[in-house]
Amino acid sequence: MELQGKLAVITGASRGIGRALAVILAKSGCGLLLTALEEDELISLREYLATETGIEVASMPADLVNSSDRQCFLDWIGRQKNPPDMLINNAGAGYFGRFASSRRIDIERTLTLNIQVPTLLIREILPVLRKRPQAKIVNISSAISRLPYPGLAVYGAAKGYLSSLSESLAGEFAGSNISVLCFHPGFTETDFMSSAGMDIGKVPKFLVRKPEVVARRIVRAIKNDVTWSYSDLSSRFGIFLAACLPHRIKIRMFKELFWRLPDEA
Ligand SMILES: NC(=O)c1ccc[n+]([C@@H]2O[C@H](COP(=O)([O-])OP(=O)(O)OC[C@H]3O[C@@H](n4cnc5c(N)ncnc54)[C@H](OP(=O)(O)O)[C@@H]3O)[C@@H](O)[C@H]2O)c1
């Protein structure tokens, strides 16, 4: 997809991968409609992009987990001068801990943000995308969507849903003006892991990527109209290896490979 002159909606644009994506897309001539929880970060990003790129950027803070906030955000998109050509479902979060001791509120928030929000945004923005000459839906999943990851069970399963949804929608929209990209980042140096209660310092450095590197790969996949992509070879290889192993070995291996659960440390 050619980016010059297009308009993209990015959720979770205030920091991390979403912010890095906004910078690269704006530099490629793509207008932006941004959202996140924190208004201050969105305003400072908007100001930075206006100075650096001169591209038209608008933003609105919203807690997408909250249905009335979500509806206000959709109404706001509808009131913009131009309709969007691309929806990037990037906002996501999880928490680390045993399933048995998970708080109900953390489970609900994780499921809503990573499953309901992208699904409903796609459904609501679809009629607009259908009318564009060329449109794209980008879902930011995770390499763990296809791996057993004790301690991140709900988040990993939610990302598994998003990857599965993306594959099916890619099939439904094949031959139309809408294409789908499902992107799977591996470990990325953002606030995501500390927000989830994890220590990125424990991850071997060769497995960790900067958000700018991940964002560049996402943009490359958008431009090349790829349907399914990873941020790095280790994620791709890890998933391939996991698919080849017997489940018993795979589950034990991934439990040992990453973190010990907090109460086993
Ligand atoms: N970092 C990794 O290692 C990694 C690996 C695989 C996949 N991913 C996925 O990549 C995507 C981006 O993650 P990241 O690492 O860039 O995370 P991040 O730095 O923690 O940023 C998360 C973004 O989502 C926004 N957000 C969180 N909850 C929200 C809500 N209820 N409503 C609206 N916006 C909300 C945040 O807004 P505020 O700043 O305003 O709070 C922020 O802009 C996520 O889908 C994540 O699951 C990340």
Image (cartoon, helix red, strand yellow):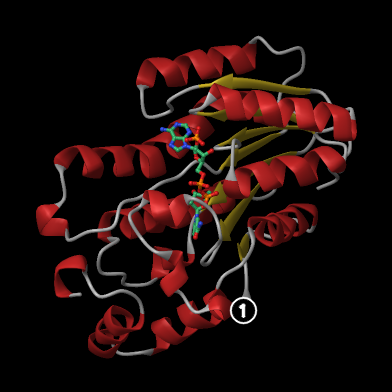
Left-right relation of 215 to 102: right
Foreground pick, 167 / 140: 140
- The residue sitting at the top extreme is 79
Amino acid type, mark 1: Leu
Q: Who's the residue at 32% across and 58% down the image?
A: 157
Would the CB of label 1 be found within 8 Å of ligand 1? no
Foreground pick, 31 / 259: 259
- The residue sitting at the left extreme is 100
Q: Is residue 173 visible?
A: no
- Mark 1 nearby-residue class (10 Å; few <14, some 14–19, many ≥20): few
Placement of 168 over or under 133, stated as above or below? below
Left-right relation of 188 to 201: right
- How far from the left and from the top, in percent, is residue 72? 49, 13
**Residue underneath mark 1:** 233
Foreground pick, 112 / 47: 47
Q: Who's the residue at 42% across and 34% down the image?
A: 117
Left-right relation of 261 to 66: left
Q: How many marks?
A: 1
Secondary structure state at the residue bearing disc 1: helix
- How far from the left and from the top, in percent, is residue 204? 49, 79
- How far from the left and from the top, in percent, is residue 255? 27, 79
Q: Who's the residue at 37% across and 72% down the image?
A: 147
Placement of 74 over or under 130, stated as above or below? above
Which quadrant would residue 220 be assigned to in this image? Answer: bottom right
Foreground pick, 10 / 225: 10
- How far from the left and from the top, in percent, is residue 176? 69, 42
Q: Who's the residue at 27% across and 84% down the image?
A: 247
